[in-house]
Image (cartoon, helix red, strand yellow):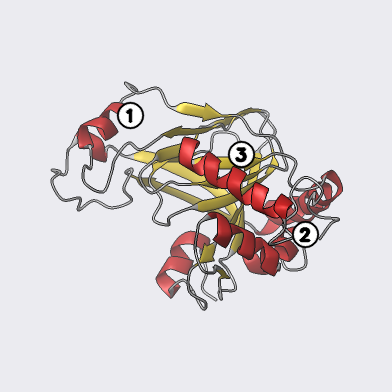
Amino acid sequence: MKHIIDLDRYPLDQPGTAPWDALVAKARAGLAQDGLFDFAGFMRPAALAQMLDHVRPRMARASFHHSRMHNIYFRDDVPGLAPDAPALRKVETSNHTLCHDQLRGSPLDQLYQWPDFAGFLAAVMERPALYVMDDPLAGVNVLEYRAGEALNWHFDRSLFTTTLLLQEPGDGGVFEYARDLRSPDDPNHAGVADLLEGRITPTRLAQSAGTLNVFLGVNTAHRVSTVRGARSRIVAVLSHYEAPGRRFSAAEQMGFYGRVA
């Protein structure tokens, strides 16, 4: 694993030691203060280059083009909102996706399957354990946003999201978020409408290739702005769950990946 991630800066292989404890504390502090933490330079440059060599030809010939119109909730029957409410304004998401079965044996797959990675995330999230998915398509995905494509405003369903940026876009493609726009006690539909109408200025997060990011997105609205220029944004999403054996349904697989395994 030392050839894939910088274990000198990020000693995930040393659970229970003082350096590991300090890294867990740093990550927790970032989540508490900013709702996220970044580990810049997490993936080593050689592994990053190897990963892109694996991804690029597969993206060109075998990726799934996902495109849909949606609202920020990914559902239309939101309690307390009429169908034409400003908070339900439609936006467009479009990208290209590679599934886990297209990434087997790659540095990214090795990282995902490494028990110390899940163990570290569990410690940061203060969970007894976290598990990889038992799904041939999900678990690890790589998403490419080409010119004119974007991940538009939404809230996450999961408590946290883990990403690893593989390639920075030439222009645009910036991660933006409005922290704690809603809460379990207050859906703040007016604030959501303000964000969608441009009356709230989101926070912009600059990232470099090789950066690991963990983000709390259940109540924080976020998006990746439209990519411009020839160089796309390529990012990996690594999914862990609190119980083993998690799989997507056939309908979810078809919706996310255009095929069923």
Q: Secondary structure at mark 3?
A: loop
Residue 91 % position (x, y): 37, 38
* N-terminal label among 1 and 3: 3
Q: Which residue does the numbered mark 1 point to in the structure image?
A: 195
Q: Secondary structure at mark 2?
A: helix
Give the mark toward the camera: 1 or 3.
1
Q: Quadrant of the C terminus?
A: bottom right
What's the residue type where badge 1 is placed? Leu
Disc 1/disc 3 C-alpha distance (Å): 24 Å
* N-terminal label among 3 and 2: 2
Give the mark toward the camera: 3 or 2.
2
- 244 or 133: nearer the eye? 244
As drawn, which residue projects farthest toward the front? 18
Mark 2 residue crowding within 10 angstroms, few (<14) / some (14–19) / many (20+): many
**Residue at 21% across / 31% down in the picture?**
190
Disc 1/disc 2 C-alpha distance (Å): 38 Å
Residue 146 badge? 3
Residue 20 against residue 229 in the figure, above or below? below
Residue 162 % position (x, y): 57, 52
**Residue at 62% across / 64% down in the picture?**
118
Q: Secondary structure at mark 1?
A: helix
Left or right position of 152 against 198: right
As drawn, which residue projects farthest toward the bottom? 245
**Residue at 17% across / 39% down in the picture?**
84
Residue 107 badge? 2
- 13 or 84: nearer the eye? 13
**Residue at 77% across / 59% down in the picture?**
107
Residue 192 against residue 109 in the figure, above or below? above
What's the residue type where badge 2 is placed? Pro
